[in-house]
Image (cartoon, grey):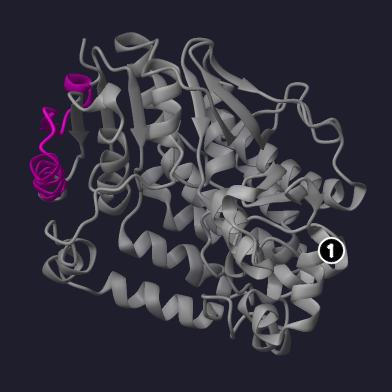
Amino acid sequence: MAKKIVFIGSGSLVFTRNLVRDLLTFDAFRDAEIALVDINETNLALSKKAVDGIVEKGGYPARVTATTDRREALPGADGVLTTICCGTNRDLYNDIAIPESYGCSINIGDTRGPSAVFRFLRTLYPMLDILRDMEELCPNALWLNYTNPMAMLCRALQGSTDTVTISGLCHSVQGTAAMLCGFIGAPRNEVTYLCAGLNHQAHYLKFDWNGKDAIPLIRKAITENEEIYNKEQVRNEMFLHLGYYATESSGHNSEYNWWFRKRLDLIEKYCTHGTNWNPGHDALERRKAVMNETTEERHTREFGNFDIASFPLDRGEEYAAYIFNAVFGDNEMFHFNGNVQNFGLIDNLPAGCCVEVPVLASKRGLEPIHVGALPPQLAALNNVSAACEELAVAGGLERDPQKIFWSCLYDPLTASVCSMAEIREMVSRLFEANRDWLPGWTSFN
């Protein structure tokens, strides 16, 4: 029987086209039903046109459907993928502009810190609605989430169901592994690694080349090659001082800690050159430009560069298709790093928090693998982030603004540049800016 994969948020075209491309390369999914869902009719039509093009170009017997009503698409689903974004361009601008007005330089703001906490709150309730629909209409479907903030959303969803299996996916683990292979000249098929921690803040606890520890080679490359050092200044500094390499890019990592974005001279030194991301002010200007663009300009930016004639059909390295194939396709077991609750996985992080650890996918489902204790310096960093995320999740589920404030109060970057009173005022302004997304919440002052 043909499998059914539902894409909720199919208007996120880069994810949708790449994941569909990957799925159709597996024999088990050549004739699958690809059910596209998006609440924006224009984006839905554009994503369907792209997916139809992939199916036609590959000569696949797959069937493509499209609807704005997910309840129409979910019955009979074997797998569900979410790539949604909740918030207008103005909301995304405010996420960065309000913290920056207090001296808090945000780079992306989609993972942790005040910007991500309010992005989480905007996204939480639509995601809980999806969960309830899945519990009713396709309780046995496997849900793979790509929507950020990954850890907070996965923690909230996984803690709110006993029925649906959910894991969050990020490409930073395999992407960084490939980068490190390039640093030391190692073929990727000769490298194995153990990576664990939190989403965007996991570290390679082992990185072996043909069975031998390659971490000294990484250190040698970074310290002796200025070009390699300058490619990832923030992460390379963290590696040199902490001893283990972080998974997410320098731009992201610069806003997850105390060390790089609290002074203009540090931003200039570490966050301007070679990180692939610009300082906070430039990020703000980019958001402002997006906020003011017309609908036609946005569609050109998001969809205009997709050319089916030049689009490759070779399988990529995103995890989703491999996982689906392992669980309900051809049952070829697959190891990946997934976001799951910490029940007996990382010994020195809070029980129940969301961790990113190795997971085995097979016809038995998803089986997270026990890692043990992190090195103490990594556990110290992860515990601060996990505590803030736990407060945000509890605040979101309980509609408790005080816990949201505490989550932001203990955020390392925010606390390094703001007083407690300033953070309270910042959070009050963020609540006001997001008022339309938070029905049922009491005011916060």
Left or right of 88? Residue 323 is right
Q: Residues within 10 Å of mark 1 (few under 14, many from 20)?
A: few
x 53%, y 43%: residue: 150
Range of residues picked out in magenta: 44-73
| Residue 52 is covered by the magenta coloring | yes
Q: Position of residue 309 (x, y in %)?
A: 11, 59
Q: Image height check: is 8 above or below 290? A: above
Task: Point out the image quarter for the N terminus.
Answer: top left
Which image quarter: residue 122?
top left
At horizontal 70% and vertical 68% (from top left) the residue drawn is 235
Identify the image quadrant of residue 66: top left
Where residue 229 sits, quadrant-wise, is bottom right
On the image, the x and y values in percent for residue 228 come to: 66, 78
Q: Residue at 10% across / 50% down in the picture?
A: 42
Disc 1 residue type?
A: Pro
Q: Is residue 162 left or right of residue 424?
A: left
As displayed, is residue 369 above or below residue 195?
A: above
* Residue 307 point in image, percent of width and height: 14, 62
Image mark count: 1
Residue 35 seen in this snapshot: yes
Residue 266: percent from left, percent from top: 72, 84
Looking at the image, which residue sits at the far right?
Answer: 376
Q: Nearer the viewer, residue 205 or 140?
A: 205
Instruction: Tell me if 390 is positioned left or right of 105 in this view.
Output: right
> Label 1's element?
helix
Q: Is residue 259 visible?
A: no
Q: Is residue 72 magenta?
A: yes
Taken as a whole, is the magenta stretch helix, strand or loop? helix
Which residue is the site of mark 1? 216
Of residues 265 and 17, the one nearer the viewer is 17
| Nearer the observer, 222 or 64 | 222
Q: Residue at x 56, y 74 (%)?
A: 100
